Image: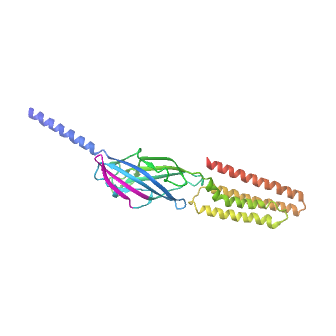
Amino acid sequence: MKRTLALFVLLLATTTAFAQDSTKNNVPDTVKVGAYIISVHDINFHDKEYTIRFWLWFVYDNPDFDFSKQLDIPNAKEIEPPEIINDSIDGKAWTIMKMKCTMKESWDVKDFPFDSQHLRVQIENTLFDNKHLIFVPDVKGSRFDEKEAIDGWNITHFQVINKENDYETGFGDASNPAQVFSTFNIEMDLERDAWGLFLKIFIGMYIAFLIAMVSFTPHPSELEPRFGLPVGGLFAAVGNKYIIDSLLPESSAFTLVDTLHTFTFFAVFITLVVSALSLKLHDAGKIQQSERVNSIGSRFVIAAYVSANLIAILLALN
């Protein structure tokens, strides 16, 4: 009887230990990870990219993790070989990496140059999915260099968070049709004081509009200045738009740049219409009506153009 009881107790203890060990093995290892942003530069709207330099660190227990070989940034165009420091802290492995990456970004240029941008750097382990590895952000230690981080922009919001990236494939493993990886995300919101840039890129367009408006001053019968000045202004506005478009990515959306230039094109067109109508009335001997059309038309074009520009700019600012 005693022997049977002893065997039962031994079996129960073995089963409990095995269950505990099995449960422990099913718990993914955690990796504490943080980042310090050194700089964000070479922002290129046309090529949809920017360059970022930052320190990245990992603190973990599992010796199978090797972030010098298992690190991936899926939304990067290019990752330069990092500088790596391997050490230990509080009995845990401690890996520090100095990173430089060229990131791809879908810029929102609808309100350019009064735009705001959201940057995201997504970091993953290439080998271990979320069943084996979970990133825990070092929120307290993660920062950005407030003096040197980015020129011409203000970082209005900065955060590091962990998320999950779903891959709807088993990468050849038919028994595992989908995999989910833990990710460490560095996210920043950017804004800028854009009035100086606005004047730089739109001064040509507004000068072109003013040149077209000068055509209202000669007498309606003077053909050359009445029609030559608006056409010259139109070509100047078109050239200005081509220059700005070369700075921006291709987009099917109608941006602030498109809106303001469209207003300018219509203003020049209406100027030509007013000049043509004034000339027709003058040739018909209706001198007073011709001058009246010229006066009312010029005031309407200027008032409508200024009002439309102000409304579009205020909407972009909001």
Task: Identify the image quadrant of residue 297.
Answer: bottom right
The verdict on residue 97 being magenta is: yes
User: Is any atom of residue 174 visible in this view?
Assistant: no
User: Magenta segment, which residues?
Assistant: 81-100
Give the prevailing secondary structure in the magenta stretch: strand
Q: How many marks?
A: 0
Q: Residue furthest bottom?
A: 224
In this orientation, which residue lies closer to the viewer: 204 or 8?
204
Is 139 placed above or below 198 here? Answer: above
Left or right: residue 26 versus residue 274 is left
Instruction: Please report the residue visible at 72 percent of the width from the left and 58 percent of the height from the top.
Output: 266
User: Is any atom of residue 283 visible in this view?
Assistant: yes
**Looking at the picture, how far across and down is residue 180, in whole percent?**
38, 50
Placement of the N terminus among the 4 image quadrants: top left
Q: Residue furthest right?
A: 285
Scheme of colours in the image? rainbow
Q: Residue furthest front?
A: 147
Left or right: residue 164 versus residue 286 is left
Q: Residue furthest top?
A: 1
Instruction: Please report the residue visible at 69 percent of the width from the left and 64 percent of the height from the top.
Output: 236
**Looking at the picture, how far across and down is residue 213, in whole percent?**
76, 59
Instruction: Please report the residue visible at 69 percent of the width from the left and 56 percent of the height from the top.
Output: 263
**Looking at the picture, how far across and down is residue 313, in whole percent?**
65, 51
**Looking at the picture, how far across and down is residue 137, in whole percent?**
39, 46
In this orientation, which residue lies closer to the viewer: 191 or 72?
191
